[in-house]
Amino acid sequence: MMFYPAKFDKEGGGYNVTFRDIPEAITCGDDLDDAFFMAKDALLTAMDFYFEDHRAVPSPSAVQQGEYLIELPLSVAAKVLLLNEMIAQNISNVELARRIKVKPQEMQRITNLNHTTKIDTIGRAFSALGKKLNLSVSLS
């Protein structure tokens, strides 16, 4: 799970929301509930910028006083970790596609946040990078 700290600044009757780790994610809401909804959407939308530019996504930092944690969907978090590992190893989509024996078009879908990808496929991609994707369950 990936939780990013967000700052909710009250302005008038609403809230402005910013993420110190993801400066592209800026939004606002009419009230606190709306601001939380918009924060989740802004964070998810900002991830697209990193994928489009093939840039590493910053890891979430520790929450500071007055901040709230906003969770990335698990499917997106897995793809973020994959993107970051590909960048760290300087591996292109084409090269990773060759390693997991899929067409380059399929690799484009695997790294597309709007496309549903089976977790087994993401696990195969990590294996091809010499890494292992681990899942765990914990108490809420």
Image (tube, rainbow, N blue to C red):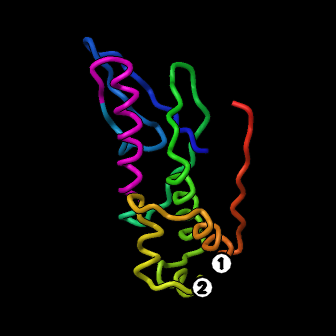
For numbered disc 2, what is the local secondary structure?
helix
Q: Position of residue 83 (x, y in %)?
A: 52, 64
Of residues 126 and 101, the one nearer the viewer is 101
Tell which residue pokes out farthest to the top in this image: 13
Q: Which residue is mark 1?
A: 128
Q: Which residue is mark 2?
A: 99
- The magenta region covers 28-50
Q: Main secondary structure of the magenta part?
A: helix
Q: Position of residue 55 (x, y in %)?
A: 45, 62
Counting every numbered tag in the picture gives 2
Quadrant where the N terminus sits is top right
Of residues 126 and 109, the one nearer the viewer is 109
Q: Are marks 2 and 1 in contact (CB under 8 Å)?
A: yes
Tell me: residue 83, above or below residue 6.
below
Q: Quadrant of residue 112?
A: bottom left
Q: Is residue 112 left or right of residue 5?
A: left
Tell me: residue 11, above or below residue 130.
above
User: Mark 2 is on which residue type?
Assistant: Arg
